[in-house]
């Protein structure tokens, strides 16, 4: 794969000018240094990309963190005829979600809001004529895997969109007292909501010029993830039509006729269907799916793959089985000859394509790092966003000849004054001989001659499925700037190493994967003699928080721990979180059931809960949780906190208001980084 250095340099110059416009000109510090928590407010990243139908323009989003609250995104258009970058809406305070080019390339449609009004909005490709076409309402009910909130008709005259209607539970749920009958009665905590609003997404279409809207589906299900057929007669969507759909995360593929509103069902599977797209000629549909009968609304142990099906619902084909790793939702090339998708592989996320009729997968982008979004263009070119080892996501283009061009370099000013630490990968054999991969972020001021010994932070990923790699991550780089090394272990259960590796955690939470983390830590201490075994910390979020709590109950090798949003009691978690099917997938049954006539699954869950072993903890622990986290409720941290006090320790509990499952607000992120460094300094310097 070749690279055009001249083109990259030219576009880098343009990107620097763009950065100055985005963030304001600043003075570059000629003495480079490591990253700080305050740099979070200066870093930007490209968050989405879509090539226009004519191929001459690229719409992309840029995420900022330079103001109070959560990060926000502004959208830009790159004109490839003159390499100019223009902000789509200038300084207008408009939120934009799910933007899509009209098929004629003249306008961009999106779900947006301005001045308190939300709905389908359109704007000219030149940024003119912004208007709200029709108002729409959403839902706070969690819809994992949902996308494509709008879809243009082929003639660019109409837009299909989602808006919500009241469900049958609404009257009682708004009463005093509140009467609950639903299984899934909670939401994610976003926006401060505790209860789901009991609204259902339905499909509508609106005439762009007149604003005349027509409702196409009318039911008590959630219909979403839209795509308009090339013939213009149907809208593709997914919906869970199970009788007890709150208890069964089982979406199938449907199409609704735009004239009469009649529906037809294309699949009736026990497994999951996610995100589907018509082929350009309308003869086939590509989608993202699984094969197993039990899929959690939170995660899936089974790798998602690329599938196709004929437009009439026949001839379902598992095209993605040629790659034994987790794949993203596919997109067709404009000529319908290929399907593009990403693949997780050994800490990286590469971009691949398959022939539309099936065959071998062809790698398109395999550099060290992560492809985070992509948009196929004509003649084999593809625009994509990519996070490498030394920068947040930027915009790239792989042209028809395989030449890779970097189109933005939005952090160039900041990184001219900052050094980035090296990330090194290594493999080791775990306790049972299984090969596991880990990534070590080296200290910025590394003294390999052992004139200085460096602390090690074991930073455990969430999941348990998913992966970490060498791509840029801010917090480890900040730790490295303070002289710390950071270890990331892709323990068993991680994706990117084949289905068998992902399945190796089945019925074994806080078991083999915890040993993988310990063996990885001990291997690093042995292989890198400049690491200080007396100054080792452990932290992680979500499943990483759970493992952090578990490990300090099993060993005294850590000098300090910072579990974030972790599960301390697997039994209480199952009944208090907003999804109740996650552990059923991980253990092969619900907690009240038995293991093939053996003991109850619930007994096994308690046996593997960190809280059960709290009396064995000697490590100083600072627990971190979002107060609006209903994925893993804050009571999971509170139980462990009280338990640690009861056994005579002096733990700290940090609760962030307004935060859900993960810390989003910029000032909270900065506070957490600084607070974590202070915690490690306090306990490493004793």
Image (cartoon, rainbow, N blue to C red):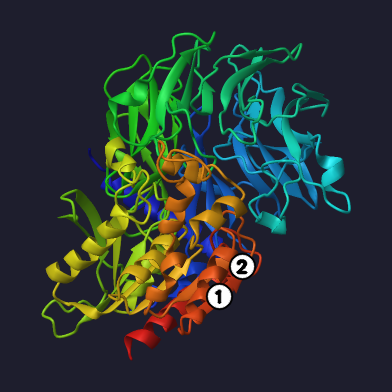
Q: Which of 561 and 481 is in front in this view?
A: 561
Of helix, strand and loop, which one carries label 1?
Answer: strand
Q: Name the residue under label 1.
A: 654
Q: Is residue 107 visible?
A: no
The total number of labels drawn is: 2
Q: Where is residue 463 in the image (x, y as percent from the top left)?
A: 42, 51
Q: Tell me which residue sits at (60%, 59%) in the image.
A: 629
Name the quadrant containing residue 152.
Answer: top right
Q: Is residue 171 visible?
A: yes
Q: Position of residue 120 (x, y in %)?
A: 73, 37
Q: Distance between the residues labelled 1 and 2?
A: 23 Å
Q: Is residue 559 left or right of residue 433?
A: right
Q: In this view, does 9 lie to the left or right of 410?
A: left
Query: Mark 2 Cα within 10 Å, few/some/many (few <14, many 20+)?
Result: few
Q: Tell me which residue sits at (49%, 41%) in the image.
A: 584
Of helix, strand and loop, which one carries label 2?
Answer: loop
Can you say whether 429 is above or below 151 in the image? below
Q: Mark 2 points at which residue?
A: 67
Q: Tell me which residue sits at (29%, 29%) in the image.
A: 323
Q: Where is residue 546 in the image (x, y as percent from the top left)?
A: 43, 61
Q: Where is residue 72 in the image (x, y as percent from the top left)?
A: 60, 56
Of the two numbered discs 1 and 2 in the rendering, the one whose residue sits closer to the viewer = 1
Q: Is residue 114 left or right of residue 238?
A: right
Query: Mark 1 Cα within 10 Å, few/some/many (few <14, many 20+)?
Result: some
Can you say whether 266 is above or below 288 in the image? above
Q: Nearer the viewer, residue 457 or 415?
A: 457
Could you tell me which quadrant the N terminus lies in? top left
Can you say whether 49 is above or below 616 in the image? above
Q: Which of marks 1 and 2 is nearer the N terminus?
A: 2
């Amino acid at each position: 794969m070749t690279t055009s250095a001249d083109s990259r340099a030219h576009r880098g110059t343009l990107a620097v000018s763009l950065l100055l416009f985005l963030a304001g000109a600043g003075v570059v510090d000629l003495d480079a240094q490591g990253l700080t928590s305050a740099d979070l407010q200066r870093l930007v990243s490209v968050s989405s990309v879509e090539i226009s139908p004519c191929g001459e323009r690229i719409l992309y989003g840029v995420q900022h963190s330079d103001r109070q609250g959560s990060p926000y995104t502004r959208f830009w258009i790159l004109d490839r005829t003159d390499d100019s970058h223009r902000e789509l809406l200038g300084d207008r305070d408009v939120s934009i979600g799910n933007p899509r080019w009209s098929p004629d390339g003249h306008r961009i449609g999106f779900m947006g809001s301005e001045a308190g009004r939300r709905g389908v909005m359109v704007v000219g490709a030149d940024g003119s004529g912004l208007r709200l076409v029709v108002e729409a309402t959403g839902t706070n009910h969690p819809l994992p895997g949902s996308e494509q909130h709008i879809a243009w008709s082929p003639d660019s005259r109409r837009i299909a969109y989602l808006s919500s209607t009241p469900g049958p539970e609404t009257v009682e749920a708004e009463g005093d007292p509140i009467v609950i009958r639903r299984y899934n009665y909670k939401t994610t905590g976003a926006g401060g909501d505790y209860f789901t609003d009991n609204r259902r997404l339905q499909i509508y279409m609106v005439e762009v010029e007149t604003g005349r809207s027509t409702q196409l589906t009318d039911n008590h299900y959630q219909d979403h993830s839209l795509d308009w057929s090339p013939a213009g007669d149907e809208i593709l969507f997914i919906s869970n039509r199970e009788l007890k759909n709150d208890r069964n995360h089982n979406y199938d593929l449907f199409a609704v006729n735009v004239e009469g509103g009649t529906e037809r069902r294309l699949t009736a599977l026990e497994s999951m269907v996610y995100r589907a797209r018509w082929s350009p000629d309308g003869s086939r549909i590509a989608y993202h799916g699984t094969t197993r009968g039990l899929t959690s609304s939170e995660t899936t142990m089974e790798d998602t793959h690329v599938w196709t099906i004929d437009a009439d619902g026949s001839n379902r084909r598992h095209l993605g089985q040629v790659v034994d790793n987790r794949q993203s939702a596919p997109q067709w090339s404009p000529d319908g000859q290929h399907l593009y998708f990403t693949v997780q592989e050994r800490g990286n996320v590469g971009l691949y394509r398959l022939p539309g009729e099936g065959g071998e997968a062809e790698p398109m982008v395999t550099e060290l790092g992560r492809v985070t979004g992509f948009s196929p263009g004509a003649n084999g070119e593809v625009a994509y966003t990519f996070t490498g080892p030394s920068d947040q996501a930027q915009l790239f283009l792989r042209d028809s000849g395989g030449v890779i061009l970097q189109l933005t370099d939005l952090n160039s000013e900041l990184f001219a004054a900052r050094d980035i630490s090296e990330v090194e990968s290594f493999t080791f054999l775990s306790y049972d001989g299984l090969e596991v991969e880990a990534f070590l972020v080296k200290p910025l001021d590394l003294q390999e001659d052992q004139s200085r010994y460096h602390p090690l932070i074991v930073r455990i990923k969430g999941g348990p499925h998913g992966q970490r790699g060498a791509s840029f991550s801010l917090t480890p780089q900040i730790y490295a700037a303070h002289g710390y090394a950071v270890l990331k272990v892709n323990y068993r259960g991680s994706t990117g190493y084949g289905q068998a590796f992902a399945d190796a955690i089945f019925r074994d939470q806080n078991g083999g994967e915890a040993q993988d983390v310990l063996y990885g830590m001990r291997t690093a201490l042995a292989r890198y003699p400049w690491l200080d075994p007396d100054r080792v910390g452990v932290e992680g979020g979500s499943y990483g928080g759970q493992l952090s709590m578990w490990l300090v109950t099993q060993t005294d090798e850590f000098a300090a721990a910072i579990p974030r949003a972790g599960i301390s009691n697997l039994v209480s978690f199952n009944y208090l979180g907003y999804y109740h099917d996650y552990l059923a997938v991980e253990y092969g049954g619900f907690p009240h059931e038995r293991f093939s006539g053996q003991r109850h699954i619930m007994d096994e869950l308690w046996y593997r809960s960190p809280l059960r072993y709290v009396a064995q903890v000697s490590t100083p622990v600072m627990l971190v949780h979002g107060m609006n986290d209903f994925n893993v409720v804050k009571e999971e941290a509170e139980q462990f906190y009280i338990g640690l006090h009861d056994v005579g320790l002096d733990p700290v509990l940090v609760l962030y208001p307004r935060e859900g499952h993960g810390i989003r607000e910029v000032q909270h992120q900065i506070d957490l980084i600084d607070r974590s460094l202070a915690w490690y300094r306090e306990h490493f310097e004793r």
